[in-house]
Image (tube, helix red, strand yellow):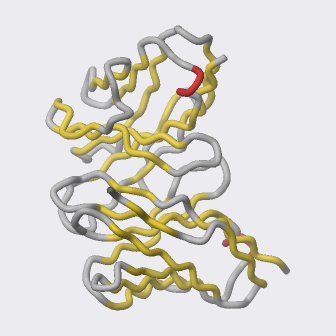
Amino acid sequence: EPEVTQTPSHQVTQMGQEVILRCVPISNHLYFYWYRQILGQKVEFLVSFYNNEISEKSEIFDDQFSVERPDGSNFTLKIRSTKLEDSAMYFCASSIGTSGGQRKFFGPGTRLTVL
Amino acid sequence: GQNIDQPTEMTATEGAIVQINCTYQTSGFNGLFWYQQHAGEAPTFLSYNVLDGLEEKGRFSSFLSRSKGYSYLLLKELQMKDSASYLCAVRVSNTDKLIFGTGTRLQVFP
């Protein structure tokens, strides 16, 4: 089965630093997402992206966050100035469409630790 | 607001059957998903329901009642590898995002 891949698997950074989390969605998918999961808490939606635009974002996704599809295969999440509370597992997901039960395929995640 | 409730933890014995319940109160409804998540790993898709009734897929089945805002995931012939968290997620109307419950951590004992 095709897979979403993410790099790095772990990222440790100092508070205030910028981080870029990278994802390679499944090749024929058109819709891309970032979710995060703080340790011991629920998975939370951050942003959805389609046709080179943000289609929806949550309250969490403030001005410190941005997403980009710099080429035909990568999808990135940038946090401009990390805070302690940004420590979480960040999951990228993709889907071929949005109708009905089009499922989202999740990547293995990047564990971000902000010190 | 959006609210999805699941039991926090459940235990069961290998070979048994377990039912994990999920209730939701959301602004609109456009489908309910169940995902399995092993510790430190990504959620993996198990099932999708949008109409009332039972969907069966091998050892796993999922049921939905839209009028009651209720779903359950039924796992039969439990195996040790089924020890994981099971996440209920609702897709609300006019949006593509999933709202997740906190997940139910299932432990299967020999």
Q: Is residue A109 above or below residue A20?
A: below
Q: Is residue B34 left or right of residue B26?
A: right
Q: Residue at x 34, y 55 (%)?
A: B98
Q: Position of residue A67 (x, y in %)?
A: 31, 25
Q: Residue at x 33, y 61 (%)?
A: A103
Q: Is residue B9 left or right of residue B27?
A: right
Q: Residue at x 24, y 62 (%)?
A: B27
Asked whether A83 or A3 is in front, the reply is A83
Asked whether B71 or B62 is in front, the reply is B71
- The single residue placed furthest to the front in the displayed view is B1
From the image, which quarter does the C terminus of chain B lie in? bottom right
Q: Is residue A34 above or below residue B77?
A: above
How many marks on residues? 0
Q: Quadrant of residue B64?
A: bottom left
Q: Is residue A37 above or below residue B103?
A: above
Q: Position of residue B28 (x, y in %)?
A: 22, 66
Q: Quadrant of residue B69?
A: bottom left
Q: Quadrant of residue A56?
A: top left
Q: Is residue B83 left or right of residue A98?
A: right
Asked whether B95 or B59 is in front, the reply is B95
Q: Is residue A77 above or below residue B14?
A: above
Q: Position of residue A90 (x, y in %)?
A: 50, 36
Q: Position of residue A97 (x, y in %)?
A: 20, 55
From the image, which quarter does the N terminus of chain B lie in? bottom left
Q: Residue at x 33, y 91 (%)?
A: B53
